[in-house]
Each structure stands twice: as structure tokens, then as C-alpha cells.
Amino acid sequence: MAFTPSEAVQRIARFSQRPPMRRQPGVIALTAGDPDFDTPDYIRRALIEAIEAGYTHYADGQGDPELRAALAEQLSRQAGAAYAPEQIQVTHGGSGALAASILAVVNPGDRVLLPEPTYSLYGDLVSFAGGQPVYVRQTADFRLDPDALRAAAPGAKLAILCHPCNPTGAVYTRAELEAFAAVAAEHDLLVLSDEAYDHLVYDGVEFVSTLAIEALRDRLIYCQTFSKTYAMTGWRVGYVAAPQPIAAAAARVHRTFNGTMNAAVQRAALAAITTPSDWPERMRREYQARREMVLEYMAGAPGVEVRPPEGAFYAFVRCDTAPSSMAVVQAALERGVGIRSGAEYGPSGEGYVRLAYSTAREPLQEALLRLRDVFTDFATQGKN
């Protein structure tokens, strides 16, 4: 029987530059944002206790009621305004929150603004929904450009913000977010804010959540995950919080795609946010030390420029001597290092590669030494 994938699959295949996530033997992977830390012990114990207590059946479709209540309390503190548990849908990881939200609001043909470079899954999901991803160039130093957003906004339905930004590490200021909110209000845009890295901010930079921007409140779709702050990538638990009609629509999408969430994992997630612990801060400090390693080893590499990331755990490295981002990726792979092409994250990413410093120091150091050799080779070839 001849088989043709659905139009949705074909749209993603045409649009996406996301590489398959496969582990390659002998390759030091700086590709995925997967913390190398074990999940903190108190969270793991909570999972075991939940299983022994009988959390082995279908959970509430919207999410564990106690978890949603705790999240509502946390969000209310951040926002300075009341969030109700009914506004929250617990999801299959942060990716599930993004998928449920985008498929809940985007119709075929809808224009969706993506300030870029930005996380590549957004464009794939918009394409999956039949929408039109519209890349909006940020400033040369990867700050939000309200004039560019304003020019692209007429007729758009949604704007998606990654804050702190994957891949650039930019942390947007309150002034930038207020200007972004003004554009959204002028053009009646919904705003999705993905704040997966909100606890990973460096050098004393202030992180201001979109939850705290009053002008966004009635149009904000807030997506979050436990993956980065608590080293829980494999647990697959996240959530979306939004005005009630949007939350209900996202809940319907998630129920249709994913069904109910793992009951015991949700109890572990509850322990993660209600148990006092210094583990998130300890991990943040270690990431900052690794960031300094990246900056140290990239300093002076020929043809290379890297802006110190303010947040997340990625370095967005410019290589002026290589013919393309993919050429750098391929050369790095030949030397046993996995990295991502900057072009994956939008047109402005061409000429850059993304390195994830979420791996341990020893392999990170070896990978950086090999990458210096890669950059030196390109610079040497350019002179010949």
C-alpha cells in the first residue's frame, strides 16, 4: 500500500530544521538542553512514596488538584493578581504545554509572530496547526525590537516569546516587556510566554516574568516546565496557565493528544515546588561556572564571537570564517562534538551555532578544546 503522510506532517517536514534527537556513541553532546544533574533526592523520594500510597491510577484530567492549587498560589504571588486552579492545565512536559496552547488558539492561515532567534519548536507547532510562522528580527544584540514587532503585527493572531531566550540567553527587561505588551494591546495579539529557564539567570541580572506585566494579563498564555529548574526532563511534567476560556481550550487539546498525566509524577512535582531546598540555586551556580568555561575557551578563538548569555544554559556562538552554520555543525561532529545550527532558530541565526553547557565540566572542557580546533581550521582555510 502506498502511504502519504498527512498534510500536517508534510507541513512540519517542509518547515522544520530541528534535528532528530539521537545519542551518537563517542560524541560529546552539547546539543540538547538536558541537565546532567540527577533529579534532587527529595523529589525522587516523593515519587516512590506516591506509588506506595496508591497513585497508580488515572489522575484528574486537568491535573492533580493539589498540584494545581499550589501552582495557582505560586503564580498569584508572581503576578500580584489572583490565578485560580481552573486556569491551569498540567501537561506532558513543557512541550505539551506549548502544543496544547498553540493548537488551542491557532487556526489555519493565522499569522504568528516569532521574535528570533528563538526556540525552533514554536515554528514547527504553528506549522502543525496550519498557521503561518512570521519571523521578526530582533536587534543586533538580540533584544526585543518593538518597531519590528509593530510592523509585522497587523493581522497577526499570536506572538510567542522565549524568556530567558533559547538560544541566545537574553533576559528581557521590564521596559522591553512593557513595550512588547504595548504592541500586543495595539494589535489585539495573544501572547504566549515560555519561561522554562526563569530560575537560570546570571550575574545578578533581574528576571521579570511576563506574569508581572499587568498590560499582558488578559492576553497571556504562560507555559512552564519542571524540567530545567528541578532537573526533571525525563519526568515529562509542565503546565500552562491562561485566561479561563484559553485554559479550557488547551485542556481539551491536551486531553485529546495526551490523556491524563502520570499520577505519581504529579505528586513528585508537588513536592518539588512545596519543599524548601537549595538544589535549584546550587544547580544555577554550577551552570554559571560552566558558562564561564565556555566564555574562557571561546575567547580568542579565530573568527569567533560569543555574547555572554544572561540566562538559560546555551551559548550562541558566531563563526565568521565558516561558509555556513551547518558546515560548523558537520565539522564539529567529525571531531566528536554535537552542536546545533543557528539557522534552526530563525534566519538571524545563520552564521551561529548553539552550544548547551548543561553537561558536566570534564566532557564540556574536552568539547570546547575540540571546537577551538574546528574554528581554527575554518580560519586557516579562509586564509589559504
Image (spheres, helix red, strand yellow):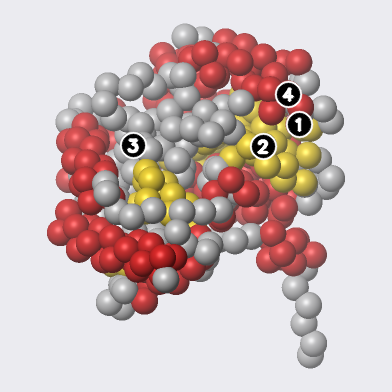
Can residue 306 be seen at all in this image of the molecule? yes
Residue 149 in picture, x, y percent from top left: 69, 27
Q: Is residue 95 left or right of residue 2?
A: left
Q: Earlier in the sequence, mark 1 or mark 3?
A: 1
**Residue at the image position 23 percent from the left and 38 percent from the top:** 288
Residue 168 in picture, x, y percent from top left: 45, 40
Number of other residues with Cα within 10 Å of mark 2, as a class: few under 14, some 14 to 19, many 20 or more? many
Number of other residues with Cα within 10 Å of mark 1, as a class: few under 14, some 14 to 19, many 20 or more? some
Q: Earlier in the sequence, mark 4 or mark 2?
A: 2
Q: Which residue is mark 1?
A: 152
Amino acid identity at mark 1: Ala
Q: Earlier in the sequence, mark 3 or mark 2?
A: 2
Q: Which residue is mark 3?
A: 308
Q: Which residue is mark 4?
A: 150
Q: Which residue is mark 2?
A: 136
Amino acid identity at mark 3: Pro
Mark 1–mark 3 Cα distance, whole angstroms, equals: 29 Å
**Residue at the image position 63 percent from the left and 37 percent from the top:** 137
Q: Is residue 220 left or right of residue 287?
A: right
Amino acid identity at mark 2: Val
Residue 247 in picture, x, y percent from top left: 63, 31
Work out whether 22 lies above or below 138.
below
Q: Secondary structure at mark 1?
A: helix
